[in-house]
Amino acid sequence: MTSAYIPPASPSIATSALLPQQATHKPDPAAPPDRSSLLLSEDEKSDTSNVTPETLDELNALLEGYSVQFEINDDIDRMVVKLVDKTNGEVVRQIPSEEMVNIIQRMKEGTLQMINTEA
């Protein structure tokens, strides 16, 4: 089998995303991560200028036919949140997903194989 070189789609991607940037400041590995960029300022928290009563009415109308259920899954010792359609009881969304619940459960049991050892 031969391999061929495929050039990157964009030179900026190759230079900015794949090559390490020179850092002028080396972070202290013992220091906790800087999460200040994740926090909202007081102005951002209280800024509701984009929210109109019509927008709130539309959001409430959109979610009117749904309910939210919180459950503790004893198999994985975690909370599961479900968005349920009120008309038919169907689960529209689940966090974590059912697949993830199964993976976590298998990991706790020690039966999850990450690598297929059979050829």
Image (cartoon, rainbow, N blue to C red):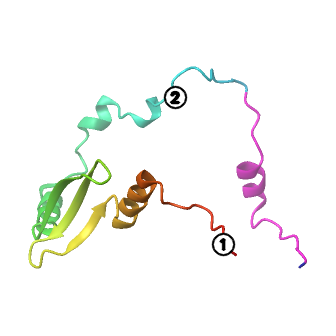
Residue 31: x, y in percent? 55, 20
Task: From this view, report whether residue 38 is shown above or below residue 68.
Answer: above
Q: Amino acid at mark 2?
A: Pro
Is 113 left or right of 83, judged from the image as shown?
right
Answer with mark 2 or mark 1, whichever residue precedes in sequence: 2
> Which corner quadrant holds the N terminus?
bottom right
Q: Secondary structure at mark 2?
A: loop
Is 40 left or right of 51, judged from the image as shown?
right
Closest to the observer, 106 or 88: 106
Q: Amino acid at mark 1?
A: Glu
> Which corner quadrant holds the C terminus?
bottom right
Q: Is residue 79 magenta?
A: no
Residue 110: x, y in percent? 47, 54
Return the mark for residue 33: 2
Q: Secondary structure at mark 1?
A: loop
Q: Main secondary structure of the magenta part?
A: loop
Q: Is residue 5 magenta?
A: yes
Do the CB atoms of the residues marked 2 and 1 lie less than 8 Å apart? no
Residue at 83%, 67% (x, y): give it: 7
Closest to the observer, 38 or 31: 31
Residue at 10%, 67% (x, y): give it: 64
Which of discs 2 and 1 lies nearer the camera? The answer is: 1
Return the mark for residue 118: 1
Residue 84: x, y in percent? 17, 68
Residue 77: x, y in percent? 29, 47
- How many C-alpha atoms fall within 10 Å of the one at disc 2: few (<14), some, or many (≥20)? few
The part of the image, by quadrant, that contains residue 95 is bottom left
Task: From this view, report whether residue 47 is shown above or below residue 6.
Answer: above
The magenta stretch is 2-23
